[in-house]
Image (tube, rainbow, N blue to C red):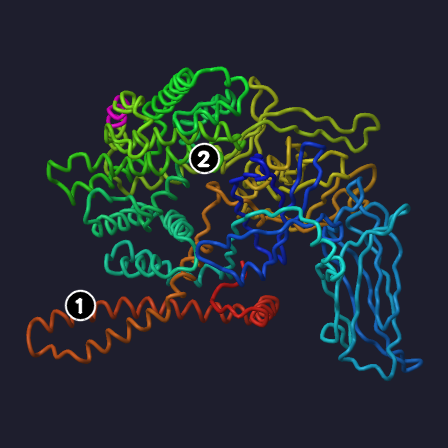
Amino acid sequence: MYCHCNLHFQKYILLFNVYFFFHQCCVFDFADLHYWTNSSGDDIIGVASVTRDYMYENKNPKGLETWLPLQKANKDLEIQGEMLLEYGIRTSEATGQSYVFVTVMEGRDLAAKDKTGYSDPYVTVTCFDETKATSKQKKTRFPEWNETLEFLLPEDTCIADLSVIVTVWDKDNFSSDDFMGQIHLDSEDVTHGTIRNWHAVARRPTSDRWARRASRVDRGKIRVKLQLLEEIVLPSSCYRPLNELLAEAVKSQDLGHLIWDMIEQDRTIELGAIAMALVRFYLSQELIFEFLDAVIVRDIAKTEDVNTLFRGNTLGTKAVDNFMKVLAMPYLQKVLKPTVDRIINEKKTVELDPCKVNSVRGRRHSLHRESEESFVNHSLEALEDYTCEIINSIVGSITYCPQVLRRVLKNIQVRVREKWPEEMFEDVPYIAVSSFIFLRFFAPAVMSPKLFSVSDQHPNLKVIRTFTLLAKIVQSIGNLIPGSLGKEVWMEPLLPLISQKITEVKDYLDLLVDVGEFSAAHRYLVRQQSNETVLIQGHLYKCHYHCKRLFRPIVLKKCYFYLTRVMLCYRKTPEDEDTMVMVENICAVEKLDYGALGKSNMGQIIHKTSDESTAIIYFQAKDVNELTAWISAIRKTCKYNVCRVETFHPGVFKGDKWNCCRREQDIAPGCSPTYHGVVLGDWQDPLDPDVDAQIIYSQIAHSKDKIRKMQHDLRMSLAGNDPSKCTNHRDVNDAAMASLSLVSGLLDVTEQLAMSHQTFVESSPRLSHSLRSRSVSSSVSGDDSLY
């Protein structure tokens, strides 16, 4: 999957601040980051590459943050696809001589090496210092050969030294042939008999000479933060004991505290990631209100100083953070997007800090002649205008806020009042609610609108400063303390506005939590909110393709598309009726090859029609980011569809055959595997309780030794106490027995899942081989595996 991000120059420093989360259910070997410049026609600056093994060996709960050197772009590194081979050793009955044979059957999803979007592939096979080649297939990424190449096996050859190298090339008439990938087979692979297998093509080993040449040219470095989370997800039935345990944890305070404390203190991933897994799990189990109540009560119980309430990053605060992101992102976008778009479009230069005013004026020629006082006044007017628009939009948005979120915030307020009922703490319930909805939701979204999907584009440095100042103002208002500026005394001219808006915000908070009690009947609101929410919307070009038409076979018409979890709709004009495709009828959504229609950023939606036939909607996006966003969003909605297909055609049926694989029937099965599981991770991710349960289990299993020690200590404590001596001993024993029962139950569930994992891995040769290979190359141990 490909994504682009905008960059901003500050001398020779490129600022991105863009996050991408990728989900994929297949094993990968490496990840490449390509640097492009759009100032001269999308020229490539360099490539940074990081291997999966490197990420695994440098695992860190906070992620791997490092500088990666940029190397010169090399076409030999642009490798993808698979080859279907038959190979083995057979003996001729006539002569008695043995032969090594390799039958090159077909290839799929090979790299496009030509400007047309295709390649002219052929294959060479090298064995015993002898090389033989297949014929060339013209203009295809899905070639078929069915050619057998044989090599005489010398009598004095040691089978253990046998090596077969299968290399795929792209034939060029006017330059050297392009490398497309390589497959290495050894004596363990090539045995007597016939083996038929798909093999992924790989890069060839980098020569020392090329590495030295590349290192002499300094192309700069890129600083990245990488985090790899690999899990083996078992069948749903395996997680039933864990699901029951986690359901009990929100009802039993002792069990809940045992699990939450263990996860929070001894984890292998970021706290936000485990909090998101818990939120999504309890949403799927319809226990989200009980879970949030349990972790919030736990945080309140641990807080001694009211001034530090919900100010740190705990499991409770992170859980509410992620709950708001999962459920209330459409609400956030509706409230802030108009103002954010206006700020980005106006591109005003604002600054209040006296230490920075002159430097800002000096960089802008149009502001150079303006006095410092005049510039500060204009900045103050712009910030007041933007602030009023943001706060007015927030306080007028009560009806758009999801009911479930309002009930959660009301419950937080009620729990805080229970802890501090005194009149001197009458503002604390307001601050508690504001610390979530303002300080952890609205203010960060103003600070980084791209990160919260409020804006499609990353603002430039000038606008970033505007958002930073506005975020400080919104934060000051959200603190609900008039006259509190901290170290930023230069914000004093804004104090009257801040005091005025604090009063309005308090009224907003009163209305926000003015909802009824949460009951079982309200659980449907979460599902209803999810189904009716528009996940993605915008204009795309719908392609009308006529395979039999000689002139103008392709007609692109601009249409408005929008997607919910139930249906995909589009229309040409606002007056037209929606054309609907039910999500349950979508079979696949994939990219279309550039060579199919000669157009870039094309996608296709394969779906069932009312008469149970298959139809395809071709569409074009404005860029690769928009294409990736639409494909990812649609894939998430149809993740569990019964009608999903496993193969598709990345080309079109042109004339009398598919132009991708040359098959002559329009109903011919697809030539490329679908990529249902490859998506971008964001708030739209559908709930998957098995994946979330597996992530939670991994964190609990990481503390298995700690759990065993707790069990041992409790047993020793019980053995050393005599309950007949006094009442206190009986009370202590009862408490210890209860704790021992909880710890033992948790350990039993953990060990049961560990055995299920071991059985599953042993029954899957591919997983078993991958884990053994990694254990040899890495000294890191743990329960993480493949997802």
Residue at 26%, 40% (x, y): give it: 518
Determine crowd level at label 1: few under 14, some 14-19, many 20+ residues with C-alpha closer than 10 A.
Answer: some
Question: Residue at the bottom extreme?
Answer: 156
Taking the image as shown, residue 731 lies to the left or right of residue 547, namely: left
Residue 664 sits inside the magenta stretch = no
Q: Name the residue under label 2.
A: 448
Q: Position of residue 372 (x, y in %)?
A: 42, 19
Q: Is mark 2 on a helix, strand or loop?
A: loop
- Eyeballing the image, is 528 above or below 288? above
Q: Name the residue under label 1.
A: 735
Taking the image as shown, residue 89 lies to the left or right of residue 759, namely: right
Residue at 31%, 57% (x, y): give it: 260
Residue type at mark 1 is: Ala
Where is the C terminus found, in terms of image quarters? bottom right
Q: Where is residue 65 in the image (x, y as percent from the top left)?
A: 51, 52
Determine crowd level at label 2: few under 14, some 14-19, many 20+ residues with C-alpha closer than 10 A.
Answer: many
Please tell me the numbered disc located at residue 694: none
From the image, give the main secondary structure of the stretch colored magenta: helix
Taking the image as shown, residue 157 lies to the left or right of residue 428, namely: right
Q: Which of the 4 quarters of the picture holds residue 328?
A: top left
How many numbered discs, if any? 2
Q: What stretch is highlighted in magenta?
A: 500-507
Residue at 72%, 57% (x, y): give it: 82
- Eyeballing the image, is 477 above or below 691? above
Are the residues flagged by discs 1 and 2 in contact, CB closer than 8 Å? no
